Image (spheres, grey):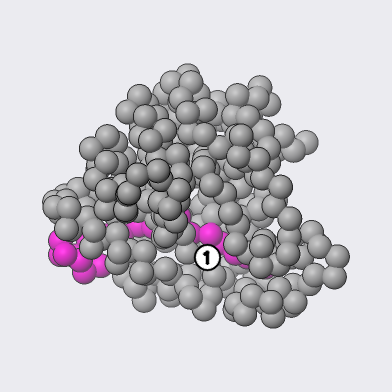
Amino acid sequence: MKTAWGDISVNDAHVHFFSHRFFSMLAAQKPGLTFAGIGEILGWEMPPEDPGELAERWVLELDKHGLERAVLMASLPGDEASVHAAIKAFPNRFYGYFFANPLAPDGIERVEQSLAAGLRGVCLFPAMHRYSLHDERVAPVFKLAEQTPGSVVFVHCGVLSVGVRGKLGLSSPFDLRYSNPIDLHHIALRHPQANFVVPHFGAGYFREALMLCALCPNVYLDTSSSNNWLRFQASRMDLRTAFEKALEVAGPQRLLFGSDSSFFPRGWHHQIFETQSALLAVIGVNAGDAREIFGGNLARLLS
């Protein structure tokens, strides 16, 4: 992709794979809501039943914008098969992540099976599923990740707002007591061979996310989304300042570019890339570091 640093390979670390099954699972959560009805409410292009066809749609989107690869995330526990089908169809274009609920009766079994099948990221949402990372029932996740080279544990911290749920009138009984990145400190130290990704710079817990990175070299920050959490900061702060501080504390080797893309017809959220690449150029990030942030770090982490 052409940038201020010349042609660089771009890998997107954060793309939601909103599959047919994903929307069907959402429809099942509210009486009267249907797959077709969701499309009418959202005004989105609804995906085909075959996840391989949706994966092909994403390949065309990557080609259109000049991306090399992207992480596709199953966005509900139980939709692992959709992402697995996508990476099986296009193994050189996608990495697969999946949502996990370790407290579900089959939660750990699903994690074990998904990692064995080649998915690379276990996505934990403690606030969504209302559990502490220190709950002994979650511990097997970290052991499995440590035993699976090229995998990561993706832990959503901070503010959690799922826009599609609000638009569909679905309840979101999340519990922010379980959203502090500091909860990862002891775990990351106990599992030095596992790698952890905290998205959105900690989504409001920016200071805590930086403290965690300073103390744990196996913790990475994902830069994805519009980063609206900035409005919760007590002091005047913008995205440029966030990047400057993250580069100072975590360094360019532990930042992963992500767009938080999700649905069609919007497709890949290129404005996120344009904003972030422009900011990093203004800050004075050199070409080598830019290549790492926008692709190299992710490729190395998941290799």
Residue at screen point 63% across, 64% down: 164
Residue at screen point 38% across, 35% down: 207
Relative image position of residue 267 (x, y in whole percent)? 47, 73
* Mark 1: secondary structure: loop
Residue at screen point 61% across, 47% down: 99
Q: Is residue 18 magenta?
A: yes
Q: Is residue 198 above or below residue 97?
A: above
Q: Is residue 136 at all visible to an observer of this figure?
A: yes
Relative image position of residue 224 (x, y in whole percent)? 41, 54
Q: Is residue 96 above or below residue 188?
A: below
Look at mark 1 in the image and give the residue it sits on.
Answer: 262
Drawn side of residue 56 relative to residue 9, left or right: right
Which of 50/243 is in front? 243
Write the start and end of the magenta stretch as one range: 1-20
Q: Is residue 13 at all visible to an observer of this figure?
A: no
Relative image position of residue 269 (x, y in whole percent)? 42, 68
Q: Is residue 194 above or below residue 223?
A: above
